[in-house]
Image (tube, rainbow, N blue to C red):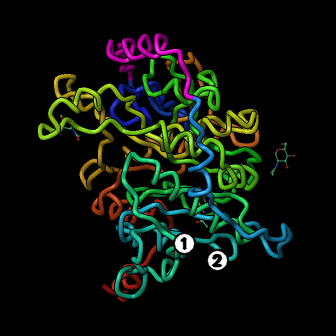
Amino acid sequence: MLVVATASARGVPPKRRHVITSTSGSRFFGWKLLILLCVSLSCVLVLAALFSLHSSYLSDADSSNHFKVTRSTVSRTFHGPPKIAFLFLVRQNIPLDFLWHVFFKNGNVAKFSIYVHSAPGFVLDESTTRSSFFYRTQISNAIQVSWGESSMIQAERLLLAAALDDPANQRFVLLSDSCVPLYNFSYVYNYVMVSQRSFVDSFLDVKDGRYNPKMSPKIPRERWRKGSQWFTVVRSHAEVIVDDDVIFPVFNRHCKRRPPIDNRKGKLNLKLQKQHNCIPDEHYVQTLLAMHDLEGQLERRTLTYTLWNQSTTKMENKGWHPITFSYANASPQRIKEMKGINHVYYETEFRTEWCRANLTSVPCFLFARKFSKGAAMRLLSDEVVGHFQVSAMLDTPP
Ligand SMILES: *[C@@H]1O[C@H](CO)[C@@H](O)[C@H](O)[C@H]1NC(C)=O
Ligand SMILES: *[C@@H]1O[C@H](CO)[C@@H](O)[C@H](O)[C@H]1NC(C)=O
Ligand SMILES: *[C@@H]1O[C@H](CO)[C@@H](O)[C@H](O)[C@H]1NC(C)=O
């Protein structure tokens, strides 16, 4: 067995480990256990939070209309097979479109749809993507997204709202511009469809200093959750996320990223640094679903594999970062190890999550990040997502 340390949260030590267990009776690789220490700073923050018991009575109602996401109420009946909506949350174009092209090409067009949230005004067409699957898939009401701010979760909600317009969309998979599939389309489709539950990474972390007591009473501390941004949800949960006009405004007001120290701001820095360092996309969906008592309808894990760089020192004070896979470290052996992971250990809850879909044991991960073009090229040539012809790729611009 080989243990790989991972975590969902940027800038914090990992809170769980993925354990690769040989699913096909292969070899014992040896343990690499990681003992993770609570960063004393977060303990201090928890204490500080306990002392500032006064909760905010400021009304969030005035700001809620501003963030309301409207969706048309569509009939729930549809003809043909249920579809997976692939939701791409990207900065500009789809850098790994060539790999997704082969993935979709080997799929069934009646069984998926694609929605892209890109920079406002950015159009996916012949001049901006090599894959015709992405032509005009950008949503028209895209907003400017600042990474680590609530505009990010607003963008997710806009994607979900657009996808809810098609009643055939029954599962909603959120993907980044560096995400890759680890399996072919039919495998992904069956895995996600047999499960009546959403896949949402969600855990309690009492030492986490991101909860802001001002969120109480709208969000009580015991409902505060943390987890990977990359979710797959069923339709009813997508509706909960889009229709939410209670929790989102609280996040918008009180869950903010701590700005970096800016010397020009002088003493103001002290005040800014006292703010709770909160990254909305690592808390919003999981906290919202907990608030709605829907945790019983979740597989509390993500389908997207991330490898965290353990060698970042505390001195750097930047926390842990995901490792970007390059051509060199996306070897077939490495990919096989990712695909062999069958359980995840959540340290803060002492919970071992054995990966299941519809009560059947399955590999934990269908997708992985962050992949460079070189690494994605390697997946393509190793035919991880299915058979492809080089000539078909060369035909298409740019
Ligand atoms: C998809 O992958 C699965 C498992 O990896 C394999 O059994 C199946 O034959 C593949 N299907 C297609 C259509 O390539
Ligand atoms: C889930 O598993 C049960 C029991 O094995 C089976 O009867 C059911 O058809 C499965 N559901 C789906 C959607 O495949
Ligand atoms: C991990 O982080 C260290 C320190 O920041 C850096 O030097 C190293 O290149 C990173 N490793 C990978 C594989 O990204």
> Viewer-proximal residue, 77 or 240?
240
Determine whether 258 is above or below 346 in the image: below
Image coordinates for residue 80, horizontal then vertical, percent: 80, 75
**In the image, 47: left or right of 68?**
left
Viewport quadrant of the N terminus? top left
What is the magenta range?
30-56
Dividing the picture into quadrants, the one containing residue 394 is bottom left
Q: Residues within 10 Å of mark 1 (few under 14, many from 20)?
A: many
Amino acid type indicated by mark 2: Val
As drawn, the label of residue 1 is none
Q: Residue furthest left?
A: 263
**In the image, 153: left or right of 128?**
right
- The residue indicated by pointer 2 is 109
Determine whether 241 is above or below 36 in the image: below
- The residue indicated by pointer 1 is 104
- Marks 2 & 1, CB-CB < 8 Å contact: yes
Dividing the picture into quadrants, the one containing residue 23 is top right
Which residue does the image show at 44% across and 28% down from the upper left?
Answer: 210
Question: What is the secondary structure assignment of the residue under circle 1?
Answer: helix
Image coordinates for residue 38, horizontal then vertical, percent: 37, 14
> Viewer-proximal residue, 338 or 115?
115
Which residue does the image show at 71% across and 66% down from the upper left?
Answer: 169
Image coordinates for residue 243, horizontal then vertical, percent: 70, 54
